[in-house]
Amino acid sequence: MTDAPLKLFNSLTRSLEVFEPIHPGEARVYTCGPTVYNYPHIGNMRAYVFADVLGRTMTWKGLKLTHVINITDVGHLTDDADAGEDKMEKMAAEKAQSIWDIAEHYKQAYWADVRALNIRQPAQWTVATDYVPQMIEFAKGIAEKHCYELESGLYFDVSTVADYGRLARANTEEGEGRIEAVEGKRNAADFAIWRKTPPGESRQMEWDSPWGRGAPGWHLECSVMSGEVLGFPFDIHTGGIDHREIHHPNEIAQNQAHCCTNGLDDPRNSGARIWMHNNFLVERSGKMSKSSGEFLRLQLLIDKGYHPLAYRLMCLQAHYRSELEFSWDGLGAALTRLKRMVMAWERLLQTPPKDAGSPTAIEQILSGHNDRFDGAISEDLNTAVALTVFEELLAAKKISSDYRLELLRKFDAVLGFGFDGLTRADLRIRPKAATIGEEQVEQAIAFRKELRAQQNYPALDRQRDELAAAGIEVMDGDPLGWEWKLA
């Protein structure tokens, strides 16, 4: 078996690069986490599925993984380009609740989605408000050379660092990095490091600083937490492609200022060796925006009867850098594919090992599957091809079950479905709108067996139609017996 070099697309250089860890044998990864002012939508969760596969790939490659995901509970404004209200303060006022209660509620909701999607726990969750003293020290360290003070707070002067905006290609790609000028700023792209609380007002989250009582800027938080836990430079910084335009260029500028480094011809000067971004999940009805008031949550998928791992599969069927269109038909197709995989896995578990034939021949076959899987996942996390290799080995009946299971479990550790703990019955989730309960369905199926024994086919047909009207799909002859019929 061969081990292909791991190649990853670096958004900073816009090129595919062989991954070489800064610290031998260890991969240090930072992922921009949620601002816990509302529930995450499924587009948000695509970023964490992607980061999870990246981390699992590092483990597959034999590296120790140190993965950090932050929780933003202060400082993120309603406009990422440094304007508007603090998202947390705004939601707390709308709900008439403590901002701390708001943060805790939505943090727990996000973690529930993480568990439902079988996303591994990172080495550390960093919560922004736990690092405010370090943020103040960081800001003090860069203020003299790189910042200036306005009535509203401390601002970073982007002209003081080399290559500002290179990540976003602000100067060469139309539409990226464009920020409207704001009165008082030296440069349109300058951003707040520290925001003073306006005179006569108070915030639920505010701290004393050399620039007045107030709160840190969103961009400052990630620079401080990534540097504090992982150290500069670390290996990989991930996030959604929406961060590539403003948030991550601002992080990079702060990192350059803090580390007293030069331009970005050497990517390590950005604070991270590689910057990786997943593309958008697109939903044509416009329900992927939280500002609409109604948006697609993972819980909504579950309420409609779809297992959350069907959404994970939907994400892995596309390359993380490709735009992915969400549709209910597409999700249904992913659920069907997942069911087939689970059924094949269950059959494999029940299949006794057989005489495998020539050990050399079997080793060559398995080596071929392993090399193809490794080659796919090593080529910038090509999960679509890796899934196909997984399914081919799952169906390779000429290979003894014990040999197949050993390698398939290793593949599954990268793909992250947890097939050993997953059954078809687990995938049969009751839609919230269903008018019939599982116990009633089981009774109807038992009665159906009696009707079949009596050869009462007209009654069987009528019952099938009645169950279908209640959202039940009868599967005569199938050990599972029935499933919820998804519209």
Image (cartoon, helix red, strand yellow):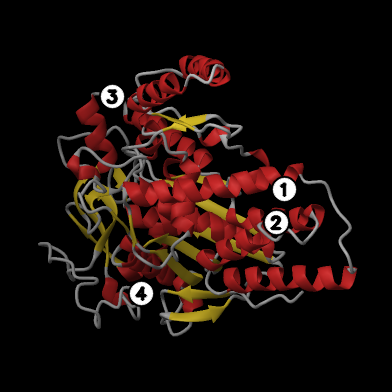
| Type of the residue with mark 3 | Gln
| Type of the residue with mark 4 | Leu
Residue visible at 17% across and 53% down in the picture: 151
Q: Quadrant of the C terminus?
A: top left
User: Relative to 454, is 108 above or below?
Assistant: below
Between label 2 and label 4, give the one nearer the viewer: 2
Residue visible at 62% across and 60% down in the picture: 390
- Which residue in the structure is indicated by mark 3? 97
Q: Nearer the viewer, residue 303 or 37?
A: 303
Report the side of 294 relative to 379 (left or right). Answer: left
Task: Estimate how packed mark 4 is, as few (under 14), some (14 to 19) or many (20 or more) residues with alpha carbons within 10 Å.
Answer: many
User: Which label sits on residue 167?
Assistant: 4
Dot 4 or dot 1: first in sequence order is 4
- Which residue in the structure is indicated by mark 1? 348
Q: How far separated are the C-alphas under marks 4 and 1?
A: 47 Å
Q: Secondary structure at mark 2?
A: helix
- Which residue in the structure is indicated by mark 2? 408
Q: How far separated are the C-alphas under marks 2 and 3?
A: 48 Å
Q: How far separated are the C-alphas under marks 2 and 1?
A: 11 Å
Report the side of 419 relative to 470 (left or right). Answer: right
- Toward which corner of the image does residue 321 lie, by quadrant? bottom left
